[in-house]
Image: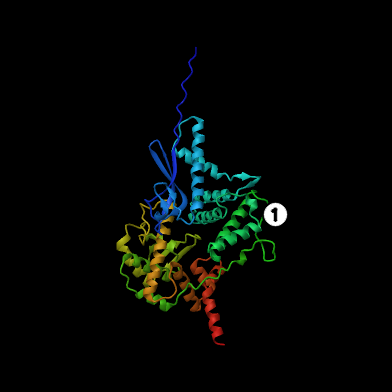
Amino acid sequence: MPTTPNPLPTERLPQIKVMLYTSKTLADGSHPLRLRITKDGGRKYISIGENCPRAQWDVEKELPRRSHPEQKRLLALIKKWETTYAEAAKRLQDIGHPFTIDMIIDAVTEASKKPRKERGGVMLLSHLQNIVDQLQEARQVGNSNVYRDTRRVLAKFLHDKDCPLSNVNVPFLNRFETHLRSEGCTDTTMSVYFRTLRAAINRAISEKLLPADLYPFSRHTSQRDKFSLAKFDLSTRKRSITKDDIRSIETVEVTTARLLLAQHLFLFSYYGGGINYVDMAQLRWRNVQGGRLQYVRQKTGGLFNLKLSTQLATILDYYRPLTFAGPESYVFGILNLEKHQTSSQIANRLHKIKGQVNQDLKDIGKLAGVETPLTTYVARHSFATVLKRSGVSTAIISEAMGHQTETITQTYLASFESDLIDAAFDNL
């Protein structure tokens, strides 16, 4: 009689658990939550896009404590992540062949790249995640983060339950706006979320994933039955300071290297044509040649070529012996060529140090007697405003700052214009 072949041994399922990743501490002192997959002696971690203070996390149970203000939402999200990967592992086990942790991750990733359809329509959160994945593959970290943040707030609004994209109508948008306002969200931040959502819907329509007649946003001011983004007040609070304030900041004597970095970055931005923090942090010594500063702006791709003023040269002379290890080394030492190589590593490092710098600038502002809370953006706004007060045209300021339109520059100068109006009324 023919012998029956021995069946393949059943592949062991992995251990899958969301845990508090205490090996990494974020700028606010909390730790990221990561999905840990353990199998055959190997282990991998996947970020779930959430973080938690250690005091609000039960390390033994690996769950948020009752004291956490968003315990219910986190519990639901954790269950969803663990279930998704556990089900993917079970499907691989049912096939009957050996599988690895990477195969589990790939199975989930491939499923997420295909916007899930329900009742004939693309799902909202799946569609946004698909955009995030594509932007990350294209190394457009900044844009992917904007879509990721928009998806995060929408997921919270929907209690982590996806809905068809066709459900995003005017009542839906009104409820989302009410939710954001109840969370203390500013008009400026809400405008970013809604513009990102609008762009995602435009993309779905262009890809034939959503009928054009379901577009919920107004295309012009006369459309009263659509949702208008013009309702958000984008007038910024006063974010510029005077030349006297700049002088006060320059003369502040700081006592630590960390405070000195913040002071130098602020002054470098002001004297460097309003160069923003991201571009400063990524400046390399090859960008400093022949008494000029040459760099490509990360946000727009515009090329800048500036003459080094005495102030800029002095700051560069301070850092040269500290950070120069060749033309490719970073000027301010915020990034490290060996530690920060991927776009994700660079973005995380820049975000962490930016929070630190802005906090240090608040302390420097107090020492300098400047009432306006200082940030790296205040330097950029101040550069534009001082030029405007000196009689420089908005068109030239716009070109100097690398703005794509003069409308953007007008936003920077909004507080300056308000000051003029206030002064005019005082004369009455």
Q: Is residue 270 left or right of residue 215?
A: left
Q: Amino acid at mark 1?
A: Asp
The outermost residue toward the front is 66
Answer with the quarter of the image where residue 54 lies: bottom left
Viewer can see residue 345: no
Q: Within 10 Å of the Cα at label 1, are there few (<14), some (14-19), or many (20+) other Cα atoms?
A: few
Identify which residue, 64 or 122, lies in the foreground: 64
Answer with the quarter of the image where residue 361 lies: bottom left
Q: How is the image coloured?
A: rainbow
The image shows residue 241 at horizontal and vertical percentages of 45, 75
Above or below — where is 116 with respect to 186?
above
Q: Is residue 127 left or right of residue 369?
A: right
Could you tell me which residue is drawn at 60 percent across and 57 percent down?
198
Identify which residue, 295 or 195, lies in the foreground: 195
Judged from the image, the secondary structure of the residue bearing numbered disc 1 is helix
Q: Circle 1 is placed at which residue position?
A: 213
The image shows residue 316 at horizontal and vertical percentages of 35, 66
Q: How many marks?
A: 1
Above or below — where is 36 with respect to 380?
above
The image shows residue 313 at horizontal and vertical percentages of 36, 69
Above or below — where is 422 with respect to 192?
below
The image shows residue 286 at horizontal and vertical percentages of 38, 60
Identify which residue, 231 or 138, lies in the foreground: 231
Viewer can see residue 241: yes
Which image quadrant: the C terminus?
A: bottom right
The outermost residue toward the bottom is 428
The outermost residue toward the top is 1
Identify which residue, 415 or 25, lies in the foreground: 25
